[in-house]
Image: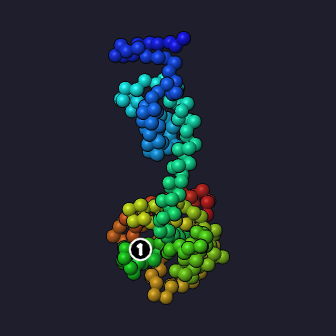
Amino acid sequence: MSKHFRGADGSLLKADKRWSDLSNKQKEKIAGWMREAFQKHYPDDEAVLDEVFQRIEKCGIWIPDWEVIKRYHAKKSKYQKALESKKAEEESALKRYNIIMVYSPDNSKLLFCKRKKSPYIGKLNFPGGKWEEGEAFIDAAYRELKEETGIDRGSVTPLYHLMDLTYYNTNNLIECYVCRLTKEVELVQEAGGNELEWVGIEGTDFGNTEIFAGDGNILHCFLIAQHCRDKNLF
């Protein structure tokens, strides 16, 4: 026999109500709220469920919390696969580039190039370039490093994949790598390419957008690289 209790408005509610007792319309609503909240808050399960509970309450649907939690965890892997598939599709459509941060052997300087073309013409940016179809991402970074600076992979510590910068507004993805020269080398500027320049780390404001490209991202990359350097990750 079902157990009942009175709601805040005095209505009689079924205490042992199950997901299967909901109408199809109610199930569709809650399932839609779960998908939306998952896309917004993943991987924070608590935040996902909090939003779903709020929307259920606002809509006046009665269902015990544990039934919603059970349903969410039963569907969570499906939501995750759908989210990962969507992300993979978005990333596959992005134009992919790379930048390479090169530290001097004593870690006191970073290598930059002065851009000859837009965007950021005349400003300092890290060496790098465009990924070519069929090329391994790491190989593209080594190739661009060699082409733009004359530095080969035997003269640096292994490239460490620091982060990716994704710009959906311009459909670009920029892979950021970092390394350190293991010996002094002679820089070789690419024919017709950007002028190369070493910049000392001490006292330099990498957030100065009058000098550096990237709308402040040079500073962000530098701070993350410094943190990784302190952990001897490259």
* Rendered location of residue 133, percent (x, y): 56, 73
Q: Nearer the viewer, residue 206 or 63?
A: 63
Whether residue 205 is visible here, answered yes or no, is no
Q: Is residue 195 above or below residue 161?
A: below
* Rendered location of residue 123, percent (x, y): 38, 74
Counting every numbered tag in the picture gives: 1
Q: Which residue is mark 1?
A: 124
**Viewport quadrant of the C terminus:** bottom right
Whether residue 78 is visible here, answered yes or no, is yes
Residue at image location 53% in from the left, 58% down from the top:
88
Where residue 154 sits, quadrant-wise, is bottom right
What residue occupies the far bottom of the structure in this picture? 191
Residue at image location 50% in from the left, 85% down from the top:
190
Residue at image location 47% in from the left, 74% down from the top:
112
* Rendered location of residue 125, percent (x, y): 44, 72
**Viewport quadrant of the N terminus:** top right
What residue occupies the far front of the structure in this picture? 24
Q: Nearer the viewer, residue 158 or 8?
A: 8
Q: Secondary structure at mark 1?
A: strand
Residue type highlighted by circle 1: Leu
* Rendered location of residue 172, percent (x, y): 44, 66
Are there few (<14), some (14-19), or many (20+) residues within 10 Å of tag 1? many
What colour scheme does the image use? rainbow
**Side of 207 relative to 70 (left or right):** left
Q: Nearer the viewer, residue 138 or 105?
A: 138
